[in-house]
Amino acid sequence: MTFWRLSLWIVITALSVGLGVLMLSPSSDQKPESAALVSPQTPVKTDQPAGNKSEMGLTPSFDIVRLEPNGDLVVAGRAGAKATVTLLMDGKEWDKATTDETGQFAMTPKSLSQGPHQLALVARMPDGKEYKSAQVVALDVPARGGQAVAALISPDQPAKSLLSGQGMALVPGQRAPVVITLVETQPNGTFYAAGRAASGALVRLYLNDSFVAQGGTSPTGEWSFAIVKGLTQGQYRVRIDELEGAGGKVMSRAEVPFDYSMPAAAETASASPRAAAVEVAEVQSTTVKRGDNLWNISSKFYGEGLRYTVIYQANSGQIRDPNLIYPGQVFVVPKDKP
C-alpha cells in the first residue's frame, strides 16, 4: 500500500511475522482477497466510515488488525497528525500510540485473553479535542487449537465483509477445513455468505445455532448461501458445518460474528445481488421487546408456548437463562430441523 512509509512497514512487518491479518482499505470497489491456507487470518478490504469531511482526517480508523490464535495482536491505522491514539479493548484502555506527521500509527498491545473482544479507537489531538472511531473490530480468540476470528463493524453502512481466519498449513493428503471468506448484506438487503471447503463437501448454514440451509461445494471447493428476506437487524453468529455425508459427523466448523444491517433506501433501488449456490427465500427472526419472554415468542410463531425450548436451543449462545431475555436481542426462530 502506497500510503505506508517504508519505516512504518518495517516496524509492522517485523512485529507481525506469523500473525493473521484483517486489512482495511478506503476503496469500496475492492473486494475481500481470497483466504490462503497459510495463516490464521487473511486480508479483508472494505470502506472507511463516512463522516463530516472537516473531521474525517481526525477521526481514528483501523487500517490493519493482525490477530494470532494465541491472542497476540498488531494494530495499525490513522488519525490526525501528532494525535495520541488510545486502543480500547471492551471499553477499557489497552494501549497507546502517537501518530506521525501523516497521521499514521502502529502498536503491539499485550495479548488478548481467550474469548470474544471488541476494539475501538479514541484520538486526542494536541489541542485537547477527542475523536472516537466510528468503526469497531470484533475479535474472537479461540481455545487452544481453535481458529481466530476478526470482523469489521461500521455504522450506517451495510456490513460489507467478515473474514474468519481459519487458514492453516496443510500437510500432503490432509483434507482442507471449511472456511468462511465473506459475509455481507447485499444492496437489496439479502444476506450472503461464501467460503471454501473440500471439493464435493456437504455444508450446512446455521444462524445463532439455528439450522437454515444445506448445500454442497463446487468441484473447486467453493460454497455460498443467500437469504432473501426475514432477518431482523442485529447481532448474529454465522456458522458453517462441513459434514461427512448426509447426517454424518461434523468434519470441520467455521463461525464468525456478524452485525446485520439493512442498506439505505438509495442503495436498495439499484440492487445487484450476488448469485448463490443455495438461496433461502425467507427465515424467521425477531427482536426482543420489553415484556417479551420465550413463551409468548413461541406462541406467536408456533401457536404454542411449549415450543419455547426450540427457540432457546437455537439461540443458546446469547441466552444464559431461558427466564431472562433482554430487549434488543435478536433471535432466529427455526422453521425446520436438518
Image (cartoon, helix red, strand yellow):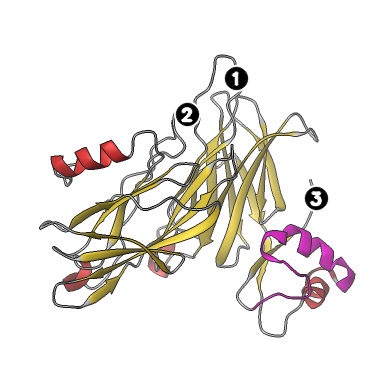
Residue topped by disc 1: 174
Residue 304 shows in the view: no
312 drawn magenta: yes
Farthest residue in the bottom direction? Answer: 291
Above or below 252: residue 65: below
- Mark 1 lies on a secondary structure that is loop
Considering depth in this image, is 169 or 233 the residue closer to the camera?
Answer: 169
Considering depth in this image, is 241 or 94 the residue closer to the camera?
Answer: 94
Q: Position of residue 218 (x, y in %)?
A: 58, 28
Q: Earlier in the sequence, mark 2 or mark 1?
A: 2
Residue type (three-letter) at the residue carrying disc 3: Lys
Q: Position of residue 250 (x, y in %)?
A: 72, 35
Viewport quadrant of the N terminus: top left
Please name which of the two marks, 2 or 3, marks the residue nearer to the observer: 2
Q: Position of residue 112 (x, y in %)?
A: 47, 53
Residue type (three-letter) at the residue carrying disc 1: Gln
What is the crowding at mark 2: few (fewer than 14 residues within 10 Å), some, or many (at least 20)?
some
Residue topped by disc 2: 37
Residue topped by disc 3: 337
227 drawn magenta: no
- Mark 3 lies on a secondary structure that is loop
